[in-house]
Structures are given as structure tokens and as C-alpha cells.
């Protein structure tokens, strides 16, 4: 791995991992629905010019747009909003750790949907270990803990929604000859349209235009939703999707560290132990014999 790739990998992990901090800070001025809508619009504003300058083919078939709408619902509208609502009651560090369960949900949904029937002993142990780690993070035996709340469950449901979206996109959107950046641009635009429809149900409160919430929202939208896509595609092209997916292991670490340093969120022993179990589980679930083969094939179909 070249120095440039290492730097891009670290930058991507920092951008995505810090996203939970920016969400927490932006909630001081915006409702979750407003936050997600502005975030998606900013992401489109970053990606659309890139797609246009490259003269990438625009999807015109109605069925593709229907699939994009479903993908936007499960990959953007639902999880982004759930994390926003969740972080109203739980720390950004907890949201980041629970988000790390996404690969476990993805495998579980793929198995249930019949798109991946490979359930080895290692994968089975990994899934069980991952959800055991999640239970440990929730510490439901501590009734005073805010993690075992609707906010914590919302963050966990967001991770499950991501899992559904990855399986759905793999079945209906990848490998259709549409460049990934154009797919991402159109998906974010579809997500913005869905959030516009949701404004009457949670977005009509007047925002507070403070420096911190507005600045956090700008960082979340431009870097976390726009630039991150570009970096991710570059990493997949350079390293393959398996190596690029190692960002999954770094996100909760970044989220926990930033939560502790910036927001002084507590770092408890159950959270640390549960995070370690989740990351070990991801390692078991993602382990494949055909790493090299899948890297070459999946580089053409990044997530």
C-alpha cells in the first residue's frame, strides 16, 4: 500500500468517523429532518459538477430511478434521520460504535434474501459475536444508561437499514453500466427529494443559524457526504474493495476518541469491550478465501 493510499484511507476514516460528532453539534441548530435534507443537498452540490465535467452517462430508465429511490430510502433517508434522532439522546461515540455493526447486518440480510448462501462456521460465529458485542455496548442491565434507550435502538436500526441498502444496491444497481459517481449523485438527489416530502413532519421548525451548528452541517455535507464518496471510489480503484473496507474498523475508534476529546463523552469499559467484539466479528464475517479475485471484480462495482 502506497503512502498516498494510506493517507487517503486515514483521511476517509477521519471524515466518516467524525461525522457522528458533526451530527451531534449540528443538532443544536437543526432538526434531524432538516439536517439530513441539507446534508444530502450539499453532497449533490459536490458530486454533480464532477459527474457533469466527466460527461458521465445520466440514467434515463424509469426502473433505474425506481431502484435509486429505494436505495436512497434505505441508504440515506432512513439511516441518516434515525442517527439524527438517536443522537438527541445518546453520545456521538455510541452512534459511531453501533454504526460499525453494518457489515453484520449486511451479511444477515444477504443470507435471508438468498443473495449470499455462504454461511461458514466462522461467519456464524462472527455474527453471534458481533451482536453479543452490541448487547454489551447497550448494557441493558444498567437501567440508568442512556444507551439502552430509543435513541440507541434508532442508531442500531440505522445500521440495519444500511445493511438492507447494500444488499438491494448489489442486486439492482451495480453492474448496470452506470458510473459509481453518477449513481451516488442520483441517489443523493433522490434522497433529498424524499426528505423534502418529510419536511412537514419534522422540518418546519425554524433553524438556529449558529456558527457551530451551521459549520458542522457544512462539514458533514461537503466532506462527509460529498468528498468522502470521491475518496472512497479512489481507494477502491487503487486497492480493491476489500482493502478499502478496512475503514470500517477505524470509524468507531475515531468516533469514540472525538466524542471523548471534544464533547467529553464517557468511555466506559463495556463500550470498549463491546467495540472490540464487534470489530473482531467484522473481521470474521468479511474474511474470504478469494480476496484477490473479489478485489479485482468489486473494484468495478464499489458500494
Image: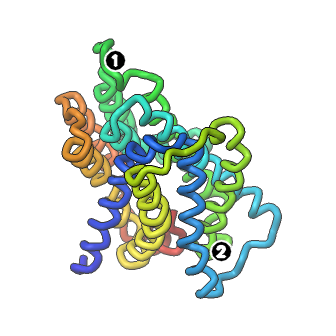
Residue nearest the observer in this picture, 292 or 199:
199
Q: Is residue 198 above or below residue 76?
A: above
Q: Position of residue 79 (x, y in %)?
A: 54, 43
Q: Which disc is residue 140 wearing? A: 1
Q: Position of residue 199 (x, y in %)?
A: 68, 43
Q: Position of residue 45 (x, y in %)?
A: 58, 70
Q: Residue at x 49, y 40 (%)?
A: 84
Q: Which residue is mark 2?
A: 178
Kindly state the secondary structure of the residue where label 1 is placed: loop
Left or right of 101, for residue 41:
right
Q: How far is disc 1 from disc 2 in space, using C-alphas? A: 45 Å
Residue 161 visible (yes or no): no
Quadrant containing the N terminus is bottom left
Q: Is residue 76 above or below residue 14?
A: above
Left or right of 30, for residue 193:
right
Residue nearest the observer in this picture, 76 or 25:
25
Q: Residue at x 69, y 42 (%)?
A: 198
Q: Residue at x 33, y 59 (%)?
A: 247
User: Of circles 1 and 2, which is in front?
Assistant: 1
Quadrant of the rendered structure where residue 104 is? Answer: top left
Q: Residue at x 69, y 81 (%)?
A: 57
Quadrant of the rendered structure where residue 6 is? Answer: bottom left
Amino acid at each position: 500500500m502506497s503512502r498516498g493510499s494510506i493517507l487517503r484511507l486515514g483521511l476517509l476514516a477521519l471524515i466518516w468517523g467524525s461525522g457522528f460528532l458533526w451530527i451531534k453539534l449540528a443538532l443544536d441548530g437543526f432538526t434531524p429532518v432538516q439536517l439530513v435534507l441539507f446534508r444530502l443537498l450539499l453532497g449533490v452540490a459536490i458530486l454533480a459538477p464532477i459527474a457533469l465535467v466527466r460527461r458521465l452517462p445520466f440514467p434515463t430508465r424509469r426502473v433505474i430511478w425506481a431502484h435509486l429511490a429505494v436505495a436512497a430510502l434505505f441508504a440515506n433517508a432512513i439511516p441518516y434521520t434515525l442517527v439524527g434522532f438517536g443522537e438527541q439522546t445518546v453520545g456521538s461515540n455510541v452512534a459511531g460504535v453501533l454504526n460499525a455493526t453494518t457489515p453484520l447486518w449486511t451479511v444477515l440480510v444477504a443470507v435471508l434474501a438468498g443473495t449470499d448462501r455462504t454461511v461458514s462456521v466462522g461467519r456464524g460465529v462472527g455474527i453471534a459475536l458481533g451482536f453479543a458485542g452490541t448487547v454489551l455496548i447497550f448494557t441493558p442491565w444498567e437501567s440508568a444508561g442512556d444507551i439502552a434507550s430509543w435513541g440507541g435502538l434508532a442508531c442500531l436500526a440505522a445500521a440495519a437499514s444500511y445493511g438492507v441498502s447494500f444488499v438491494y444496491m448489489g442486486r439492482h444497481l451495480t453492474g448496470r453500466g452506470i458510473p459509481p459517481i453518477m449513481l451516488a449523485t442520483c441517489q443523493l438527489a433522490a434522497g433529498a427529494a424524499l426528505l423534502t416530502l418529510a419536511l412537514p413532519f419534522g422540518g418546519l421548525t425554524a433553524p438556529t443559524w449558529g456558527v457551530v451548528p451551521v459549520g458542522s452541517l457544512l462539514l458533514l455535507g461537503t466532506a462527509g457526504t460529498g468528498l468522502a464518496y470521491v475518496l472512497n471510489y479512489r481507494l477502491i480503484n487503487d486497492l480493491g474493495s476489500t482493502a478499502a473496507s478496512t475503514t470500517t474498523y477505524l470509524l468507531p475508534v475515531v468516533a469514540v476518541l472525538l466524542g471523548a476529546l471534544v464533547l467529553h463523552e464517557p468511555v466506559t469499559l463495556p463500550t470498549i469491550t463491546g467495540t472490540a467484539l464487534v470489530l473482531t466479528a467484522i473481521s470474521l464475517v468479511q474474511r474470504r478465501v478469494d480476496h484477490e479475485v473479489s478485489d479485482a471484480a468489486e473494484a468495478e462495482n464499489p458500494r
